[in-house]
Amino acid sequence: MHIDVITVVPALLESPFNHSIMQRAKDKGLLTVNVIDLRDYSKTTYKQVDDYQYGGGAGMVMMIEPIADCIADLKSKRTYDEVIYMSPDGQLLEQGLANRLSLYKNLIILCGHYKGIDERVREHFVTLEISIGNYVLSGGELAAAVVVDAIGRLLPGVLNNETSALEDSFQDDLIAPPVYTRPASFNGWEVPPILLSGHEAKIKQWRLEESLKRTKERRPELINKWDAPSNKET
Ligand code: SAH
């Protein structure tokens, strides 16, 4: 998968993809993330990318011209499955959306800044708008990093054990069961004995029960979906 991220603050995206699982995805050639500085597409001397908003009011708005030129340039080299704009009023990022995006080949992610972007960009270039939650960030970069991470770890071959992403919370609409590692006893706090039993089937059963219990306690709205498989998104 290839992802082009358009930003006015490329420095914010220098680190998130260069460590851990994202780095592994890149090393294996399964993911390329290209961070593009929108100012490279500005035609003004001072590399202007934002301007005052029509109608007055505080806060700058990202201009359409550099964004249009940048997207046209990218589209001359690749065909994109989606042009995504990170936006607090977009579709909420959930596991199902990450799963869907992970099946694509080429994505553009546009990060807003300041007051946001000229509405005409959203109307004419953007095909999908994603929010990472009902709160406002100062820019789309951290949100874009969240999206790339959520997608990247799902690409086949990125995680060591391909099934491990399937066992995460929200896959199957269940919260993951608790996990433990050594030591088996700390401060008198014991690891559940079943996990030390070596009995695979019983451990599997215990994990499922814990998942169900946890989902009922913490995300009861998911359990309803789980109880009625016909309602499940595929
Ligand atoms: N004035 C806008 C907010 C602009 S915040 C409004 O009230 O809706 C600046 C940029 O940060 C946005 O253009 C967007 O790209 C990004 N952003 C802020 N909150 C976000 C969120 N919850 N999810 C995704 N992107 C977000």
Image (cartoon, helix red, strand yellow):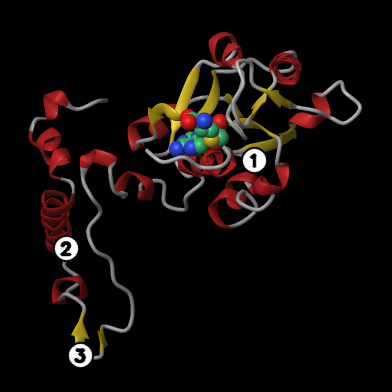
Q: Residue at x 62, y 51 (%)?
A: 23
Q: Which residue is mark 1?
A: 29
Residues tagged 2 and 1 counted as in contact (Cβ below 8 A) = no
Query: Quick one: 107 or 145, which is closer to the camera?
Result: 145
Q: Quadrant of residue 1?
A: top right
Query: Quick one: 25 or 233, which is closer to the camera?
Result: 233
Which amino acid, by three-letter code, is at mark 3? Answer: Gly
Q: Position of residue 174 (x, y in %)?
A: 21, 45
Q: Nearer the viewer, mark 3 or mark 2?
A: 3
Instruction: Find out if the beta carbon at label 2 lies less than 8 Å from the nearest ligand 1 atom.
Output: no
Secondary structure beneath dot 3 equals: loop
Left or right: 57 with respect to 75? left
Q: Residue furthest right?
A: 45
Q: Which residue is mark 2?
A: 203
Which amino acid, by three-letter code, is at mark 1? Answer: Gly
Residue 188 disc label: 3
Instruction: Find out if the beta carbon at label 3 lies less than 8 Å from the nearest ligand 1 atom.
Output: no
From mark 1 to mark 3, how far is it between C-alphas? Answer: 46 Å
Among numbered discs 3 and 2, the one appearing first in the sequence: 3
Residues tagged 3 and 2 counted as in contact (Cβ below 8 A) = no
Q: Residue furthest bottom?
A: 187
Mark 2 surroundings within 10 Å by alpha-carbon count, few (fewer than 14), some (14 through 19), many (20 or more): some
Q: Residue at x 60, y 51 (%)?
A: 16
